[in-house]
Amino acid sequence: MRPLLIQGGHIIDPAQGINETGSLLIAGGKISWLGKGDIEPPLSDFDLLNARELVVCPGLIDLHCHLRQPGFEEKETISTGTKAAAKGGFSTVCCMPNTDPPLDSKTAIAYVKAEAKKEGAVRVLPIGCVSKGRAGEELAPMKELAAAGVVGFSDDGDPVLNTGLMIQALRVSNEVGLPVIDHCEHTGLTGGGVMNRGEVSFELALPGIPPAAEDIMTARDIALARLTGGHLHIAHVSTEESVNIIRRASEQGINVTAEATPHHLTLTEEKMRGYNTNAKVNPPLRTQRDIEALIEGLRDGAIDIIATDHAPHTGAEKRRDLTSAPFGISGFETALGSLMGLVHGGKLPLITLISKLTCEPARIIGDKFGRLGTLAAGASADITIFDPDKEWVVETKSFVSKGKNTPLAGTRLKGKVMATISGGKIVYKDDRIKIEEKTEPAKTSRRKRRKKGI
Ligand SMILES: [Zn+2]
C-alpha cells in the first residue's frame, strides 16, 4: 500500500494534547509522521487526502455494540455491522456476547474472531459472557475466555443479578486484568416497563421503569468492586443518581469506569409520545435533568467514555406493539452527528468529546490489542475524518446497518463522518473525499529547484 498523506486538517489527538492544524502520514498500517502547521514530510511518491476544513482524529472506539452474529443474522451480521461502524467513524468495535450461542466458550470467541477477520470492515474485539449460557447461575470459563482474546466480560442484555456470582466474576477479572461490564438493572423493579417511569409514562398510560432500578444495581456493583478490587465497568448509565454514585466511588479510588450512550445524552422520554417503538430502549430515555447530569459527568470525568450500545432489530420486530417490540436503537451511523449537537450547543468541548470516543476507551481496553486511540507515531493507523459543520438528514433507507430502528429518522444533524481508516485501510469514504496520486520523482523537484535558482 502506498503511503497516504492526510493534509491540512484540524488534528485533534487528546492523548497527546494536540488540537491544531497539521498533516498526518500513514504507511505500513501505522502512523509514521505527524507535522503541525504547514510542514510537509520529505516524500515524492504518495497518495494525498486533502483534509482542509475537516477534523482528523484517532479512529473512534466503541466499547459496547451488538453485532448479532452468530444466531440473529436477520438483525445484523459482522459484515453489515462493521460496515455501519465504519460509516459512523468507528475503527474498533467491541461486540457483546448475547448471541446464539452466547460467547461463553473459546470456540465461540474463535468463531467471531475468524468471521471478523474474513468479513469485518473494522477491528472487532469480542466481549465474553460472565455466566455460562448467560443464565446467571454459574461462572463462564472466564480465564479460558481471557486467553482466547476477549476484551472484557458481560451478560449485557441482562444484569448479573446473583450477587455471589458477581463477586466471583470481579475476583477473576482482577486476576486476568479485564473489566466486568454490567447492565445495571434490578429486574424486580422493571418487569413489563417500556419507558422511563414518570410524568410522561403516567400521561401515556404506559408501564414505567423507575430510575431506582438502575441506581440500586449501580450501588450494589460499586460495593462489590470495593470488596474485591476488580475492575467494574458500568454500561449505559442513564440516571442522575447513578452518575452521582459513580462519581463518589471514583473519588474514593474504587476501580470503576462508566459509559453513556449518544441517545441517553441527547434524547428524552418525550420521544415516546406517539408510542414510537424505535425510541424503546433499555435503560429507557430519561429526562432533561438526567441528560444534564450525564453531560456534567462527561465533563468532570465521572463518566469515562461514550459507547453506542448499537442494537439493531428487524422492522417486523419494531412494528409490534410497544409491549412486545424489543428494546434497542441502531446507533452506529448517527452517533457522531448526534453528539456533535452537544458541541455545537456549547455543552461539551470538541476535544472532550473526542477523548471520550478515543483515548479513554483505549485506556479501558489497555494495549493488549495494539496501540489504539492516538495519532502518535507508531500507533495503529486508525483515523476518523469528519466535517464538524456538515448538515445532513437521517434517512434510514441509506443505513448500511440492517437495523433501521432509530428515533432519529428525519432528524437534521450537524457533523458528518467523511472517512474512516482502520489499520491503515480506508474502510469508509464519503463521495466528496478524493484521493490524489502524487508521483513526482524526487530528482524532478531538485531540477525545478535548480531552475528556480534555489
Ligand atoms: Zn445493556
Image: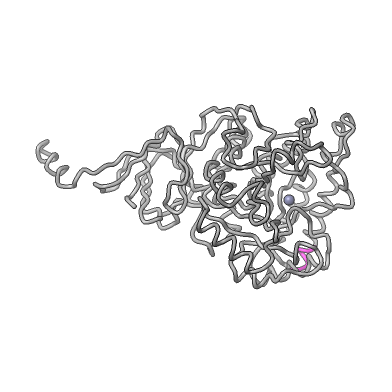
Q: Is residue 225 magenta?
A: yes
Question: Which residue is rendered at x = 62% and y = 30% of the image?
Answer: 345
Determine whether 310 is above or below 371 in the image: above
Determine whether 363 is above or below 60 in the image: below
How far from the left and from the top, in percent, is residue 445? 17, 42
How is this picture coloured?
Answer: one colour
Count of numbered circles on the image: 0
Q: Nearer the viewer, residue 25 or 14?
A: 25
Residue stretch rendered in magenta on the structure: 224-228
Left/right placement of residue 109 relative to residue 322 reads left
Q: Is residue 105 magenta?
A: no
How far from the left and from the top, in percent, is residue 435? 35, 39
Left/right placement of residue 282 relative to residue 50 reads right
Q: Nearer the viewer, residue 187 or 177?
A: 187
Q: Main secondary structure of the magenta part?
A: helix
Observer able to see residue 246: yes
How far from the left and from the top, in percent, is residue 237? 73, 47
Location of the C terminus by quadrant is top left
Q: Nearer the viewer, residue 35 or 167?
A: 167
Question: Which residue is rendered at x = 60% and y = 33% of the image?
Answer: 397
